[in-house]
Image: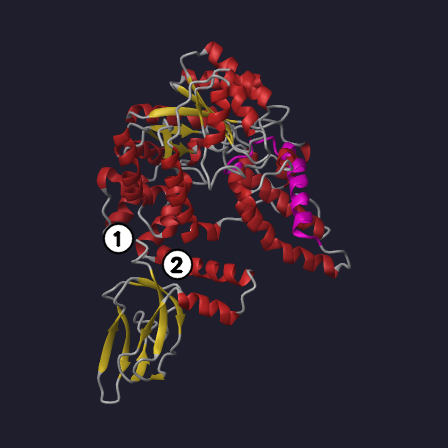
Amino acid sequence: MGCFARVETNGGAFEQVNLLYGENPNKAVRQFTKFFNEAGIQTHMLDRGLNGLRMYPVPADVRKLMYKVKKAQGVDITRIFCGLNEVRNIIPSIKYALAAGMIPQATLCITFSPVHTVEYYAAIANQLIEAGAPEICLKDMAGIGRPGMLGQLTRTIKEKHPEVIIQYHGHSGPGLSMASILEVCENGADIIDVAMEPLSWGKVHSDVISVQAMLKDKGFQVPEINMKAYMKARSMTQEFIDDFLGYFMDATNKHMSSLLLTCGLPGGMMGSMMADLKGVHAGINMILRSKNKPKLTLDDLLVMLFEEVEYVWPKLGYPPLVTPFSQYVKNVALMNIMSQVKEEPRWSMIDNNTWDMILGKSGKLPGALAPEIIELAKEKGLQFTDEDPQTNFPDQLDAYRAEMKENGWESGEDDEELFELAMHDRQYRDYKSGVAKKRFEEELQRAKDAALASKGFSEEEVRKFKRSKAEPITALEKGRVIWEIDVESASLAPSVGKVYNPEETFCYISTPWGTHDKMLANFKGRIIEVCAKQGSIVNKGDVLAYIERTDLAS
């Protein structure tokens, strides 16, 4: 396309998705970065500071190893952020990145509150630059940063540190992103994060075509876009969405809403938030019905949640609403709504991770806690702390090395497999056991079935549609069907979503003359329907099951 100086190639969401899909993230990162490295395009990753690539804190030795691994895998730049803008969580990663030969891009998590002023952010930027960061990212993760303030902040940093590169990252959800991009560019920003169709706009970034046109018209030096390549990349992305990504995307991700200005929640978590709301919607209405109160629509519940976030946020010390603190605040707000529906007091349900944030274990909160929160902590006998957050999480690499040795697992090139286990231990174990892939295939099939059902198809129509995209596996002989999955469950038929490889045993046919004829799958695919029960008698040519081929797609 000719217009990108940098491409984001990996980070927390990337690698966890790889593992949940049943794929090796290290192989994926090396393959992905290789082509950008060869083309002279810088590769970019996300580092959540104290949390590394995950949602909860990481020991220091694992954080150090991450930089050694990522540099070896071909990653150039790391965007280091802390949801609290806590410099004690960011500065160690700056040091680790420099030691490994990577470019540390220190990050300011932008939000809009009485405490998040230009002076507040500029003071943090000064500390991060002094610690060795050659770049600053303005991470406007919810897109609620006001354009004027962002322009003023950009100018303030550039006037004091003209050599520092400033990159702006702003989401489109509330509708301010294009104005914000123009403001930061006119005040000295160097690089702008953009997206491209079919994933741009909505809760994501502005589209590269629109941004290029706006900046070009204002006289900025911006590269031309190879539209033939753009359309090819656009088409490939749509194919990926149609294949399986789209089944896991909430439709509202494509929507923009000015309501997001009031709650300040980031676009990246809106999909999970809608899933949470749908999950509690029926339960809330059941409680209301038992109290002879009118039921709530999903929109009613959404507005209630936004308003409760707006109420909760300042009382929790104004943590910038970015991972994981956006989830903590949203969870408290949702639990408060549940409590109020049950006619119980607010703050009845606060999870341990949120308490850790409140107590200072993740770092210093930007604002003051409400007296009622402090009093609640005292009632529970909880202790506040101002210690360096990293001291709460001792080194663990030796324990993970021992686990790999015990399991007979290789630590991998540049210790990358050791790193993956240490960073995402639960997901990595599921990946190694094969559980992750099996679970993903089953979830995908359920999502596809639900999508068809939601379009008003009858069960029979759904079955016919699925069969039209699959191939039947038919009995080679007359006899009794014997399914075999493993020793413990040999009496069960395979589950929908189970994947077979070409040379894998599909089933046995026990013939009347005493033989057990093995049937092979003959091609790679996933089960979409089982037609023959364990022990049932079939004739030659009867359909045993339908398999959707996956070898053709690849």
| Amino acid type, label 1 | Asn
At which x and y percent is residue 32?
30, 39
The answer to whether residue 123 is seen in the rendering is no
Mark 2 residue element: helix
> In this picture, is 14 found above or below 391?
below
The Cα–Cα distance between marks 2 and 1, rounded to whole angstroms, is 25 Å
Q: Crowding at label 2, few (<14), some or many (≥20) Cα neighbours within 10 Å?
A: many
Mark 1 residue element: helix
127 sits left or right of 455 in the view = left
| Residue under the point 29% across and 25% down | 101
How would you classify the magenta stretch by its main secondary structure?
A: helix
Residue marked by disc 2 = 441
Question: In what quadrant of the picture does the N terminus appear?
Answer: top left
Q: For the magenta stretch, what is the residue range?
A: 296-325
Name the foreground residue: 201 vs 222. 222
137 sits left or right of 285 in the view = left
Q: Nearer the viewer, mark 2 or mark 1?
A: 2
376 sits left or right of 38 in the view = right
Task: Classify residue 492 by image quadrant.
Answer: bottom left
Q: Earlier in the sequence, mark 2 or mark 1?
A: 1
Contact (Cβ within 8 Å) of mark 2 with mark 1: no
Task: Classify residue 416 by image quadrant.
Answer: top left
Q: Residue furthest right?
A: 292
| Residue under the point 27% across and 35% down | 35
At which x and y percent is residue 38?
25, 31
The answer to whether residue 155 is seen in the rendering is yes
Residue marked by disc 1 = 407
